Amino acid sequence: MLLPAGVRIDGRSGAVTPATGSYAKHLSELAGLYRDKAAHAAMVAGQDPLAYEVVDYRHQDSDLAFGTTIMAPGRVGDEFFMTRGHFHERRECGETYYTQSGEGILLLQSRDGLVRTVEMKPGICAFIPPDWAHRSINTGDEKLVFVWHCAPDAGHEYGEILEKGMRKLVVARDGRVEIVDNPNFVS
Ligand code: M6P
Ligand code: ZN
């Protein structure tokens, strides 16, 4: 029998207590994500900064999973630190992202090429519909921390986004955040 639990989530640090797992992604593990290859290589050769961490709370046999994602601020060339972006393997599964601190943009793309963005800032819980690819992007100067919630067996499908990219890029231009067409997108 599964037992109830109260899980502490620190909205500033993203710490989950108790957590059942976590992983970290450094820039070196995110090759191919950024279009400025020279900037990426220079940063990897330097400090290879931590780009984001994912912490989860899961139970075997439960139909619920949640956790946090903690994204460092930073840029590679003019692109902000971002997650890889994925569809769910189980296409009927959606997800929510409830921002706790920091600011960013959630970039979403449907299978047939619609693009939407949802602002990420404290107080906004983003609804990610089934079968929309989603990537979060930290556009601020501080950590972007959000609580995610999805089916534990939703699964991650990375292939399409990894190979084709997303239709839009979120970039810094003249001190502003802009959403522009991705010139390298493979349609
Ligand atoms: C969120 C969730 C996770 C996902 C993570 C990083 O925390 O959607 O399931 O793994 O973001 O995103 P990605 O796996 O696309 O790098
Ligand atoms: Zn997801």
Image (cartoon, grey):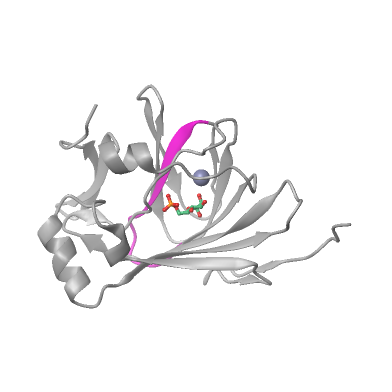
The answer to whether 33 appears left or right of 53 in the picture is left
Kindly tell me whether residue 72 is visible in this rendering.
no
Where does the image place residue 5, in percent across and percent down from the top left? 80, 64
Task: Work out whether 11 lies above or below 63.
Answer: below
Image quadrant in which the C terminus is located: top left
The answer to whether 86 appears left or right of 151 in the picture is left
Where does the image place residue 2, in percent across and percent down from the top left? 85, 58
Q: Which residues are magenta?
A: 131-144
Where does the image place residue 12, in percent across and percent down from the top left? 52, 70
**Residue located farthest toward the right when viewing the structure as drawn:** 1
Kindly tell me whether residue 23 is visible in this rendering.
yes
Q: Is residue 48 magenta?
A: no
Q: Quadrant of residue 110?
A: top left
Residue at (41, 56) in percent of width and height = 103
Residue at (18, 54) in percent of width and height = 78
**Residue located farthest toward the left when viewing the structure as drawn:** 38
Residue at (44, 68) in percent of width and height = 24
Where does the image place residue 66, in percent across and percent down from the top left? 63, 55
Q: Quadrant of residue 1?
A: bottom right
**Residue located farthest toward the bottom when viewing the structure as drawn:** 47
The answer to whether 62 appears left or right of 173 in the picture is right
Residue at (31, 43) in percent of width and height = 162
